[in-house]
Image (cartoon, rainbow, N blue to C red):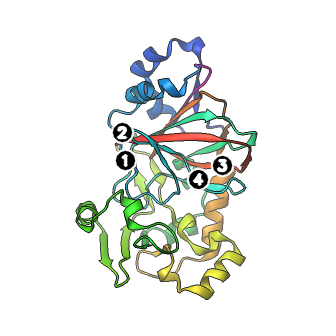
Amino acid sequence: MTETMTWAPAEITPSDGPLPGLLAGHLDELLLSAGAVVFRGFGITPAALDGVLDRVLRDRLAYVHGNSPRSHVGDRVYTSTEYPAEHTISMHNELSYSARWPARLAFYCETAPGSGGATPVVSGAAWLAALPPGLRAAFAGGVRYTQNLHDGHGFGKSWQETFEAAGRAEVERHLAGMPGTTWEWKRDGGLRITQVRPATVTHPVTGAEVWFNQADQWHHAALGDETAAALARIMPEEDLPQHVTFADGSPIDPAYVLEIRDRGLAAAVDVDWRAGDLLVVDNVLVAHGRRPYSGPRRVLVAMSG
């Protein structure tokens, strides 16, 4: 994949051919070359979505260990997020804080927003190249994520919701297969998970090195000064629902966090939604986010390994 300042997802329309043939023919090659593909103008209906997803995603995954607020609306199909409409969601690769992440994402626009609400996408290699050398060097040793999940009553998400599980044994089986992960059950019934992950990864096919972490989203500095200060009065950083440091436990400079966030958003290309659109993303090559919006926006997401 060649990185330039004019990178954009590929756009496929009915003039390129019928949808079934396009999905069966060249989608894999398109994703490797472009990183993201928008199918626009095909009039994909909610009733037809399952059949389309079956062609796009070979093995749909459950949203296990995810930290975004979303609802289950179908066979391993979810709302893309239920984060408040007035806020921007910064760029990220799905589950990049985990040792297991989906290889491919598919976003479907059921209802276009009244205004705003684009899904920005950015090449991970371009995002990495946009970061200053000193910042990249600081993250060379990786990052440490700490996640505190309550037992059904508390701040943030519960471990039952996060892992779509009712019992501890199922959660432990999932975590046991994840390198660099430790966990402990707390006295109040909650669960604390610690994961040490690299800041970049290399795509298994293209060989591209990409920025691949959520340090900016997990850091308290990204919450804004007032929110961060309020939380600091309630609990120590290590007890927040999400907390991040460098891999050795040393703190990450808030200035790094804001630069990572802002450079990712600045380099992104907006996908403006129309009802029936489908956006397919290679989850390693390309990161995504969300712009603020007004109106009844409904975008669904499914993912595969």
The residue range painted magenta reads 37-42
- Residue carrying label 1: 62
Q: Position of residue 298 (x, y in %)?
A: 61, 40
Task: Calculate the distance from the C-alpha at mark 2 to the C-alpha at mark 3.
Answer: 30 Å
Task: Calculate the distance from the C-alpha at mark 3 to the C-alpha at mark 4.
Answer: 24 Å
- Please, what is the three-letter code of the amino acid marked with disc 2? Arg
Between label 3 and label 4, give the one nearer the viewer: 4
Left or right of 179? Residue 106 is right
Q: Which mark is residue 267?
A: 3
Q: Position of residue 68 (x, y in %)?
A: 51, 57
Tell me: residue 9, above or below residue 185.
above
Between label 1 and label 3, give the one nearer the viewer: 1
Residue density around tag 4, few if under 14, some if 14–19, many if 20 or more, within 10 Å: few
Name the residue: 68% across, 35% down. Answer: 112
Give SS at disc 2.
Answer: loop
Q: Which mark is residue 60?
A: 2
Quadrant that contains the C terminus: top left
Name the residue: 49% across, 52% down. Answer: 93
Residue density around tag 1, few if under 14, some if 14–19, many if 20 or more, within 10 Å: some
